[in-house]
Amino acid sequence: MWPYGPTSAGAMGSESGDCRYVKGMQIMKALVVNCSARSTSGERLYNLGAQKLKDWLWCQGYCVTYVDGDPGMWELDADLVALSVIFSWHAPLAREIALRMKNRAEVWCGGPGMFALASWWRKETCLETVRGLDDRFDKQRGRYDMTFASRGCPVNCSFCIVPRLEGTHFTFDPDFIPAPKLCDNNLSALPADYQDHIIERYRAYHQPLVDANSGFEPRYFTEETYQRWKPLLDETRAYWRFALDETRELEDVRCMMTILKEVSPSRKRVYCLVGNEPIQACYERAMKIIEWGGEPFCQFLLPLNWLGDAKKVKSRYDWTSYQQGRDFCRYFNRYGWRSYPIWHYQNRKNEPPPFAFLCPKTWQG
């Protein structure tokens, strides 16, 4: 934890904690907190919004300290505390910090994880959230690990936060600075000339594309899309990321898989939403991904305002619990499907296999 200078300048402030001064007067101090520093599995998470906010505040004249996770009792003399939340289940940490600091400093809180929690936040903290993209620093320039060349997505999936957060019409940032991870929400639906512009900009900056993170939408994916992006993704052996979230998308995904037939299965990372349809339908979707030459990455459907309490996840169809959804995802995401059928999966010895009913002899007769 230390004061930072702007990332774009490649500079950091003094590790001793010295602040910036102008004409002998101390500059206001800001504390930027990445409340989503770790995933549920313990993986470290990069927070692009918090990084941009840190740099923007520095450019506004603040002395800025950036922290991943709870700062504890450090930086109690901050004039401004800015809390960034990627996932809603990290909001309780933001609440804890806000209640600790709100009588000492001005408190801002925002990020995609807070979008559906405005009422809860107001009730818990008596403060307001920043909803949606923050135009003050969304296009802050710098050399970051992630970047956006466009925002929005025209598909408008009911379970996705993107249409609510960024809109159903694309907005473009042609002057974006390329980064290893490109986070645009729907690359294949972008106008062809803008896709070309993105690729040309990566070439001009000599920036390898390590991950097209949110990937391609199968219904818009064509042979031309494949040929356009193939050279850039092949250079780093990046994943082709796309999704099969609903049964009605099967034909679109099959067509995309056909176009990608020469790509190895390990590079076709297919997100598979589960919990939004009956278990049998979710299982068949995941198995189709494997049959067509891809690898499923399953994600259990959670409400946009979920605060992390497994007991408060409302199950749909024949799903019985959040734990059952986690078990389903664990089987596919840890490649159990390579070794044994799902009806043999048993994560806890004192409980029966949670998917024994999927055995063909069971559901056929």
Image: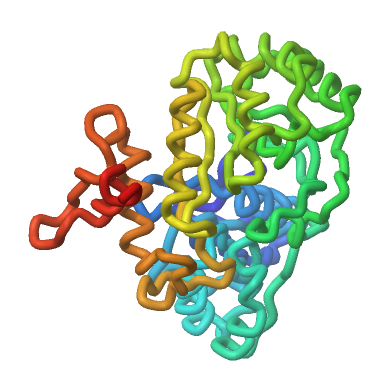
Q: Residue at x 48, y 68 (%)?
A: 316
The outermost residue toward the front is: 365
Q: Residue at x 37, y 65 (%)?
A: 322
- Is 216 placed left or right of 276 in the picture? right
Q: Work out whether residue 251 or residue 74 is closer to the camera in this orientation and state it.
A: 251
Looking at the image, residue 55 lies above or below residue 98: above
Q: Position of residue 273 (x, y in %)?
A: 52, 49
Looking at the image, residue 193 lies above or below residue 275: above
- Is 192 placed left or right of 358 in the picture? right
Q: Which of the 4 image quadrants contains residue 5? A: top right
Q: Position of residue 211 (x, y in %)?
A: 58, 28
Q: Position of residue 247 (x, y in %)?
A: 59, 46
> Is residue 9 among what the camera can see?
no
Looking at the image, residue 91 lies above or below residue 193: below
Q: Which of the 4 image quadrants contains residue 22? A: bottom right
Q: Residue at x 58, y 31 (%)?
A: 241
Q: Residue at x 67, y 13 (%)?
A: 230
> Is residue 85 among what the camera can see?
yes
Q: Position of residue 275 (x, y in %)?
A: 47, 58
- Colouring style: rainbow
The outermost residue toward the left is: 350
Q: Work out whether residue 164 or residue 354 is closer to the camera in this orientation and state it.
A: 354
Q: Which of the 4 image quadrants contains residue 116? A: bottom right
- Is 325 placed left or right of 102 in the picture? left
